[in-house]
Image (cartoon, grey):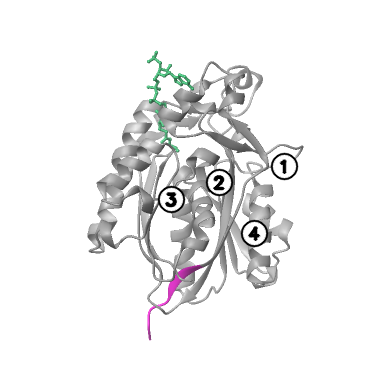
Amino acid sequence: MSKIRAAITGIQGYVPDYILTNKELETMVDTNNEWILSRTGIKERRILKGENLGTSYIGAKAVEKLLKKKGISPDEIDLLICTTVTPDMQFPATANIISDMVGIKNAFSFDLMAACSGFLYGLTTASKYIETGNYKKVLVVSADKMSSIVDYTDRSTCIIFGDGGGAVLLEPTTEEVGIMDSILKADGAGKVHLHMKAGGSVKPSSHETINAKEHFIYQEGQPVFKFAVTNMANVAEEILKKNNIKGDDINWLVPHQANKRIIDATARRINVPLERVMVNIEKYGNTTNGTIPLCLWEWESKLKKGDNLILAAFGGGFTWGAIYLKWAY
Ligand code: UT7
């Protein structure tokens, strides 16, 4: 019997309407368009406005549109995995909330937390369910409402992040397409450089934690940059070597969109020219879990069956990894 692989058979992104430009940020903190553009590559990012709207809203919008586009009923979904660092609530899982919002009734669902590498972790996990042969339709929803944890008085973080995300449908295939290989890594020692100080079980929310602004992203930009630039390039190179492929064989590099300089360094290392690198950081900034699905969504019409894609990410945790996949449609 031929091997069952998991193939992405549909993709849909969602970004909120509100555009927060560098110009508007100039009125909020001591920054300027030139600095943001040259240090990060970001021109603008999307912000989810409106009462009681969280990450589930972004995820549900993407899933609804995806199911409609594919002509699939919510009843057909077997499993929904949501990857996010900004869940609607600490519990229950945002995956369950999304399933309820879109009318998915016959599936189990759970959240998975791997920060900016969440989509790679989610896709790899989902592919294992598909490969058993017991699950036919699995959704991976990767989204974040980063504006809910950004301190808009901190110029070192507020210029980077934005809201948005996407969903992919995975189905089994016996053709030579789909997820071919995955390398995932983690190093908890990275916690000191990138985390949220309070609101968890170690330091529950209190008046003191709120006054000390401990419910926002804490990031030491330079050390994170150094780890990101080295590890993302290393893991991309590693997956190429492991699968005996070269830069010339790659149709698209799909990197996490944290900083244009990190993207360029990764592309250089594996010899993929920039015209074959998906980059939309200028429009959306760093949407954490959302970046890679948003790229795939925007490039969907350019992708061809059999195209070789390398997905690569680095993020809080630290977590990082790369996936080699052959586009399936
Ligand atoms: O996705 C999750 C993983 N995260 C990442 O991969 C992010 C990695 N880090 C980065 O992308 C970059 O470190 C940042 C974009 C966060 C910062 O860029 P940087 O080139 O590392 O800047 P820096 O922190 O070294 O700061 C350089 C200078 C400092 O001024 P002095 O000390 O040289 O006078 C900062 O105070 O730039 C100043 N600065 C700013 N100036 C204008 C910092 N933020 C700003 C700002 N506008 N927004």
* Callout 4 touching callout 3 (CB < 8 Å): no
Quadrant observed for ligand 1 in the rendered image:
top left
- Which residue position holds label 1? 53
Q: Decide: is 63 above or below 86.
A: below
Name which of mark 2 and mark 3 comes first in the sequence.
Answer: 2
Q: Nearer the viewer, residue 240 or 93?
A: 240
Mark-to-mark CA distance, 4 and 3 = 22 Å
Q: Residue furthest front?
A: 275
Mark 4 or mark 3, earlier in chain: 4
Q: Nearer the viewer, mark 2 or mark 4?
A: 4
- Cα gap from disc 1 to disc 4, whole angstroms: 16 Å
Q: Amino acid at mark 1?
A: Leu
The residue at which mark 2 appears reads as 84
Of marks 3 and 1, the one in the foreground: 3
Q: Which residues are magenta?
A: 1-8
Amino acid identity at mark 4: Val
Mark 4 closeness class: few <14, some 14–19, many ≥20 residues within 10 Å: many
Please give the label number shown on residue 278: 3
